[in-house]
Amino acid sequence: MEWSVSGNALKTLARSITCLARIGNELTLQASPSQLALHALNSSRSAYQSITLKPAFFDTYTITGAQVQCSVLLKAVSSVLRTPLTSIDHLTVILTDPDASKVQWTLDCYNGMKKSYWITCNVEADVQQLSLDRRRLPSSFVVRPRDLNRLLANFQSTLQEITVIATDPTLLPPDAAADEVGGKAVELRSYIDPTKENDSSLHTQLWIDPCEEFVQYTHTGDPVDVTFGVKELKAFLSFCEGCEVDIHLYFEKAGEPILMAPKFGVEDVSVSNFDATLVLATMLVSQLHDRTTSTEPIHAAHGTEDQVNERPKGNVSEHPSDHTRIWSELSASAAKSATGTSGRARRERDLNINEHVDIQRMSTINISNAGEEGRNFQNNTYPIMLCLFVYYLLVKVAISTQLLLNGSILGC
């Protein structure tokens, strides 16, 4: 096996290696006369990515025999591509023999320098084949990477899982447009593990109008949801953004895998010399049973009837174009209460921490950390002011007495 790449193809290969390295630890190369396939599988076997490169992708592509396969550590391959791509003329990869123990990676630089690396490989690699047909998945949507990045920016950077809920736009109730969510058919929701105790995390829900935010949206029938990892999503999102292609997501329901691919992976594969697929496992438990209760406002624990029936509009903000709405709250193990003030609901939570928390979100989040010390400060304000006033009077009397004594001494 011998192949070489340069120019834009080298940049695409570097993006592929970076994306695969965020999925798994081992890179499997499976070469045939028709294509070169790169595979990566994470340790928990919950994420699988495959990138296929056609012979037209390479400057030179030579395969001896029907098929050649081996596996190398992605960490070692990433170290090879640590050299700035702008200084590399072309990259050449050679496997001299199907039973060879090392793969040679050679970088020819513009300044005349030549770097060669011999990476240990396993010729008896465990090659995984994808048996999931994306055309059988009923629900899908296409979104531009920059738009999806903007939507994900509303969630915490430490979020591990996210839930996507798809609804048939034609089945929305007639009064949905007047509702708080504005009749949006797609919802993105941060997933918080209910088994974790003493966890203070920001729970965010994002309602999206697919006609405005997505390039394409397909879903019919009852609502479905899928919950999957954010780390792998962002890795594939960066890959598609670097390749300047849209990202296509296919899914069915909770417990079934979700598949992601570049937009040209289906319709325009004939005009592209590479393709990519990312498959993620989803949680078995559906989150749809929480949807009704989660969108309900948190009413005041004490107050008038008007205050109790007031919706907490301070926690639901609209996108400037009215295509997206977001709602956020802090989740913690302590009990929560809210009071209506000037038409806005205030949430009070015990965060079990001794420092102030400053969270800047699109929505209004009011957090009260005042405890016994804060109340004592307010109650003790009057005695302190009274003591200061008495002290001021005593000092003034002492000064007046001293002036009178000085005047008497001078008169004598």
Image (cartoon, rainbow, N blue to C red):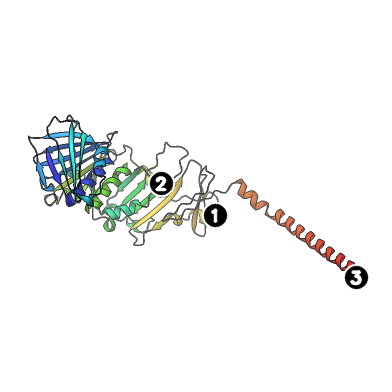
Does residue 178 show up? yes
Q: Which residue is mark 2?
A: 293
Q: Which mark is residue 409?
A: none
Farthest residue, direction bottom: 411
Front tag of 2 and 1? 2
Quadrant location, the N terminus? top left
Residue that label 3 marks = 411
Q: 312 or 213: nearer the eye?
A: 213
Residue at the far right in the pictured view: 412
Q: Which residue is mark 1?
A: 304
Callout 3: 10 Å neighbours few (<14), some, many (20+)?
few
Q: Amino acid at mark 1?
A: Thr
Name the residue rendered at 22%, 45% in the picture: 16
> Mark 3 or 1, which is nearer the eye?
3
Lateral position of residue 279 relative to residue 207, left or right: left
Q: Residue at x 53, y 50 (%)?
A: 368
Q: Amino acid at mark 2?
A: Thr
**Of the image marks 2 and 1, the number of the one nearer the N terminus:** 2
Of mark 3 and mark 2, the one earlier in the sequence is 2
Residue at disc 2, secondary structure: helix
Mark 2 to mark 1 CA distance (whole Å): 22 Å
First in sequence: mark 3 vs mark 1? 1
Q: CA distance from mark 3 to mark 2?
A: 88 Å
101 or 332, nearer to the observer: 101
